[in-house]
Image (tube, rainbow, N blue to C red):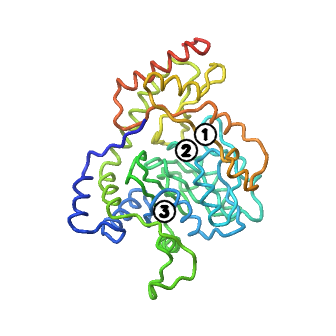
Amino acid sequence: MYEPLLIGREKQLLAECIDSGWISSEGPFVKEFEEQFSRYIGAQHGVAVCNGTAALETALYAVGVRKGDEIIMPSFTIISCALAALRLGARPVLVDIDPDTWSMDTTQLESKITSKTTAIMPVHIYGLPVDMDSVFECASEHRLKIVEDAAQAHGAEYFSRVRGKRWVKCGNLSDVSCFSFYANKIVTTGEGGMVVTNDPSVATRAASYRNLGFHEERRFYHTELCYNFRLTNLQAAVGLAQLERVEETVALRRTLATYYRQRMAPVHGVRFQAEPSYAKPVHWMYAVQLDEALGVDAESMMQQLKDKGIGTRAFFLGLHAQPVLRKLGILTDEPFPYTDQAHKRGLYLPSGLTLTRSQIDAVCEAVRDIVQEGGNGRI
């Protein structure tokens, strides 16, 4: 389904860690990785953490989210977004998605704001930027923080009319942003994450939160409950090697996405994520949604592809439908039809950086055959 591309200096830098003995979070590569990654995004500060979920929680803490606050986020996202809020005693408030982009429907933001709302969490789903200008305007009017989930969007860009009519990299659009470096991300450290910001006070709070809240003057003295979310020097070494090739990696993902779309174009009823003019996406996953008229849903398509030796993965189940969140009694019973539709009819096709064109050809031919056999036969 997804194989990371580790063909740079990863082994060399890992060997340097081992030879020097710097394998913990105290090693020099951690700071270098923070500096280089934040520079790539265009921001001033980076705080490395152990994973993307920790990055979300750390970012919310750093902008001052506290117990009783409400955080607006899309239902169509990984549960990490809700967990980050809940761990701080805050409540996730959900919006549905746009049916074409699968990004949060920003027209719903106003209706979700209450006196308890403190932040909006836009999620750049599958590497496609959210239409951020409407988020900026809403946050500015109501004095809300923006905590940007860019876990899947390394290198993606958004054209902002509000922010100077220019292209800006995802992760440099908000008060604070969060990245994941899981094995299937564009930049990977195996596990890992980063909090990125232009606000030095936010960076200081984030750095404290990920390091148990130690005081500089009095190390083993703690005034707040913080956590050990540190990244190791070994992981940072891999990240630095990955960063050296990030533009090449992004270009490859875009090339493969274009080829996928060309080969799948003759198969009616199978569509990729929309690409609005305001976005330069990075196609973190090659995701498709099946039209209802085909007579084939995502579960059936995935099983039939599996029978042909092709691995796939389902779309997110909406947060509004997660049993554990419903059990907590924190969610409303309002409908999220487009999130439900995406889950039922969406799937990721093989998306690894090692994919060849012949492999993409085989995937597209298999999808076409399944549509012919199980749908209405329109090709």
Question: Which of the two labelled residues, at mark 1 and mark 2, occupies the earlier sequence position?
Answer: 1
Disc number placed over residue 360 in the picture, else none: none
Q: Secondary structure at mark 1?
A: loop
Q: Residues within 10 Å of mark 3 (few under 14, many from 20)?
A: many
Q: Tell me the residue that label 2 is attached to.
A: 125
- Residue at x 61% of width, y 55% of height: 121
Q: Are marks 2 and 3 in contact (CB under 8 Å)?
A: no
Side of 312 relative to 131 (left or right): left
Label 3: element kind: strand
First in sequence, mark 2 or 3: give its number: 2
Counting labels gives: 3
Dot 2 amino acid type: Ile
Residue 246 image offset from top left, x and y in percent = 35, 48
Left or right relative to 3: residue 162: right
Q: Is residue 201 shown above or below 365?
A: below
Residue 136's spot in the image, x, y percent? 62, 56
Cβ–Cβ under 8 Å for marks 1 and 2: yes
Q: Quote the CA–CA distance across marks 1 and 2.
A: 7 Å
At label 1, counting other C-alpha atoms closer than 10 Å, the crowd grade (few under 14, some 14-19, many 20 or more) is many
Counting other residues with Cα less than 10 Å from the Cα at mark 2, is it few (<14), some (14-19), or many (20 or more)?
A: many
- Badge 3 is on which residue? 195
| Residue pointed to by mark 1 | 102
